Amino acid sequence: QSGLTQPPSVSGAPGQRVTISCTGTSSNIGTGYDVHWYQQLPGKAPKLLIFHNNNRPSGVPDRFSGSKSGASASLAITGLQAEDEADYYCQSYDTSLSVYVFGTGTKVTVL
Amino acid sequence: EVHLVESGGGLVQPGRSLRLSCAGSGFTLADYTMTWVRQAPGTGLEWVGFIRGKPYGGTTEYAPSLKGSFRISRDDSKNTAYLQMNSLKTADTAVYYCARGYLTGDLYFFDSWGQGTLVTVSS
């Protein structure tokens, strides 16, 4: 179902900056649809991390930021912390599939 | 505080049916679009479908691959949404999450999630 591609894994040392890409197509992100990001800690439910491409819900640290350009989006984590080890998913809407699509997911490992 | 609790998961044989529940608290479920998302073991998230809130007509939308097999409903008096799953297949084995939809323009993101309930389809 997914039309959004993410790297399977990224890693970084504590304090470093990592970025996660989310590549879409002309039928989803490229159409202009917003991208949202979710964090899924091990064994837990997903949690909204970024909405409308670059907005943080209350309580989400400003170490997390999002951006979008063309048919792609990115999530950046600066000042990486051990508690950031999780799976991260982007989400948008695909007009040709008529579904809400999630990215393939990226596992962030803190070295 | 918004809280969502799923229930009703378990082991079911292929071809059988199962109904999941999603009880909401801390908000009026009738006013919101309630979504179901599933996650097969070791894989990513897959949108199942949703039921729009009363202000938006209460209509349903489903992933095309699941339309006809799954049905979403809501009992506003119980602040609860449901996912009726029929003709279950082994490929339907997953953790099923309910989530609250936040409308932005014509589309949604999902701002609160339940803890999930595991459905295992196996003979």
Image: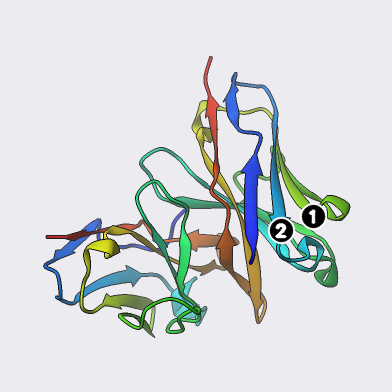
Element type at mark 2 = strand
Answer yes or no: do the residues labelled 2 and 1 have beta carbons within 8 Å? yes
Residue occupying the point 67% across, 77% down: B106
Identify which residue, A100 or A44, lies in the foreground.
A44
Q: Give the mark toward the camera: 2 or 1.
A: 2
x then y, percent, for residue A59 = 46, 76
Q: CA distance from mark 2 to mark 1?
A: 7 Å
Pick out the residue farthest to the right.
Answer: B77
Element type at mark 1 = loop
Task: Tell me which chain the residue with mark 1 is part of.
Answer: B
Amino acid type assigned to the residue bearing label 2 in the image: Ser
Amino acid type assigned to the residue bearing label 1 in the image: Asn
x then y, percent, for residue B34 = 69, 59
Identify which residue, A106 or A27, lies in the foreground.
A106
Residue wearing tag 2:
B25
Task: Tell me which chain the residue with mark 2 is part of.
Answer: B
Residue occupying the point 74% across, 45% down: B82
Residue occupying the point 50% across, 61% down: A101
* A44 vs A91: above or below: above
Location of residue B88 (image quadrant) = top right
x then y, percent, for residue A87 = 33, 57
Q: Is residue A4 visible?
A: yes
Q: Is residue A69 visible?
A: no
Residue wearing tag 1:
B79
* A11 vs B22: above or below: below
* B115 vs B7: above or below: below
